[in-house]
Structure formats: structure tokens, C-alpha cells
Image: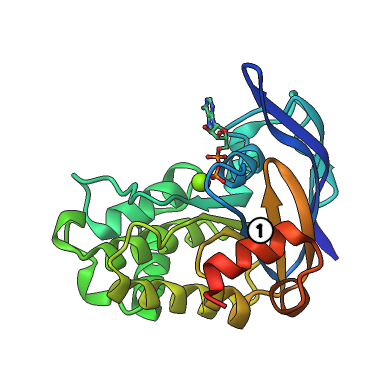
Amino acid sequence: MDLLVLEQVRKHYGSQQVLRGIDLAVAEHHVTCLIGASGSGKSTLLRCINLLETVDDGVIWLDGRDISDPRVDADEVRRRVGMVFQAFNLFPHRSVLDNVTLGPQRSLKQSTSVAEATALELLDRFGLADKASAYPDSLSGGQQQRVAVVRAIAMAPRLLLLDEITSALDPLLVAEVLDVIAELKREGMTILMATHEMHFAQEVADRVVFIDNGQVVEQGPAADVLDHPRDERTVRFLTRHLGR
Ligand SMILES: Nc1ncnc2c1ncn2[C@@H]1O[C@H](COP(=O)(O)OP(=O)(O)O)[C@@H](O)[C@H]1O
Ligand SMILES: [Mg+2]
């Protein structure tokens, strides 16, 4: 079943058309990788799905409901759609544990004990148990980004959006964050992620969507798009990014 469906989504900033009629479907339990050059509209697309931006035209369906309707409660949608950004957005003056429990306590009205038990279990599962009382600036970039992912999934979202979450990391730290994503896939999380990690996409993605200049040029099973691209623009992009 498709958890998320976009139909002819359009968005402009001033005179610039950034999204030019995006059609996209994300199946439940799938990892879908959005690839495309810088400036092609990947972040804008993810921000529209999380209602951080409003669309000009088109419809976004989540779980069969039109979330692009302006009457929709954006906070309610964001409780079901987790998002992690490129820059680490942890609260610097809060411990790792507090970073993870704040959302569930405030938005989901969980008790402190329930939120902390869940947080500690998640931190443990992702190798961060010994960091619960640490402050973000004492962690490596990879650890901070893993905490950011744990914080997002502590809300038990239906859909997880990841916006180039490894691109600010030292290459040595990228793998530990990608491992977390692979683990979430094994657990059945539905993930839509913008990434430059083509080899990760090859290994883990179910579907790949190539965006160029605000349009979906090509989408399909990862092996089809990455190994047998049909459009010349996809071929050129992959030649540059897969080094072949
Ligand atoms: N808030 C904004 N205001 C004006 N232009 C923006 C804004 N956000 C993004 N853009 C422009 O939209 C285009 C797509 O940007 P973005 O979605 O960030 O692409 P990507 O994530 O693929 O690099 C770029 O030309 C960018 O400059
Ligand atoms: Mg971006």
C-alpha cells in the first residue's frame, strides 16, 4: 500500500518554479531515495511533505488523507511524519535523553517514565546507551546524527523523512549513520530520504527517484534506475556520482 502519494505538486519561490508537478508514491515499509543535483528541489519537496512549506498546487496524501489541505492541523501531521535534517538540530543545552524525550512528552503527552524507558531502549538499540546523560557537543557528528534519528523515531512516526543526513559528516562517520537507516528499514519503517550516497541507495533503497530541476525525470526499483537508467539526464548524473 502507498503510505504517501504526491500528485502534481508545484511550488515556486518568487519567479522561480522549484517543484514543477511532482508525482511520487512511497509504499509502506519501503526505503525511497531521492537523488538529484544540488538545487533540484529535494529539500523543498521534503519540507512540503512535513508541512514546513505550503504547496502552490497539487495534492499530498498521507494514509489516504489530503494533508495539503490548508485546514489540516500541521502539528498533528508532524507527529506522524518525522524529519531529520543535514545539520544536527539537537538542543545544545539538553542532555541526549532530554532531546529524545521532549517530543513524546510534549506532543504525545507521555509520562516522563514512559518516555524515558522508550528513549533508553532506543538509545541502547542504536549503540548510544552510554550517551544518555551526555550533552550534544560532547558527541561526534555521527553520534549526534544518530541521536537525531532516535529522537525522530521516538515519536513512532508513520513516515520518516531524511534530508541528506550524512552530508555534513566526516566520511569515516557516514557508515554508522547509514547502518542506523538500514536497521530501521529491517524494522519496517517507511523512509523517504534525499541522499548523495549512491552506493547506499544501491544496497538499501527499494525505489529511487531522480529529480532534475523540480521534475521527476525517472523513478522505479532501485536496480532499474541506478543500473539501467533510461533518461540521458539520469545517465549523466549517475556517471558523475557513481564514478563509472
Ligand atoms: N526559502 C527559499 N526561498 C527562496 N528560494 C529557495 C528557498 N528554498 C529553496 N530555494 C531554491 O529552490 C531551489 C531548490 O532548492 P532545494 O529544495 O534546497 O534543492 P536541493 O535540496 O535539491 O539542493 C534552489 O534553487 C534554491 O535556491
Ligand atoms: Mg537539499
Q: Position of residue 84 (x, y in %)?
A: 47, 53
Q: Position of residue 20 (x, y in %)?
A: 77, 35
Residue 10 sits above or below residue 24 on the image: above
Q: Is residue 167 left or right of residue 162?
A: left
Q: Secondary structure at mark 1?
A: loop
Q: Quadrant of residue 142?
A: bottom left
- On the question of residue 176 being in view, the answer is yes
Residue at the farthest top position: 14
In the image, taking residue 109 as reference, residue 124 lies left or right, namely left
Q: Who's the residue at 50% across and 69% down the image?
A: 197
162 vs 28: above or below: above
**Camera-side residue of 33 and 97:** 33
Quick check: 47 left or right of 121? right
Mark 1 residue CB less than 8 A from any atom of ligand 2 = no
What residue is shown at x 79% (from left), y 61% (from top)?
231
Is there any visible trace of residue 186 in the rendered image?
A: no
**Residue closer to the observer: 196 or 73:** 196
Quadrant of residue 141 within the rendered picture: bottom left
Q: What colour scheme does the image use? A: rainbow
Vertical relation: 206 (above or below) 161: below
Placement of the C terminus among the 4 image quadrants: bottom right
**Which x, y percent locates residue 89?**
34, 47
Would you name the residue on which mark 1 appears? Answer: 158
Query: Which amino acid, by three-letter code, is at mark 1?
Result: Arg
Q: Nearer the viewer, residue 83 or 93?
A: 83
Q: Position of residue 81 (x, y in %)?
A: 61, 50
Please rate how many residues cluster around mark 1, counting C-alpha atoms within 10 Å: few if below 14, some from 14 to 19, many from 20: many
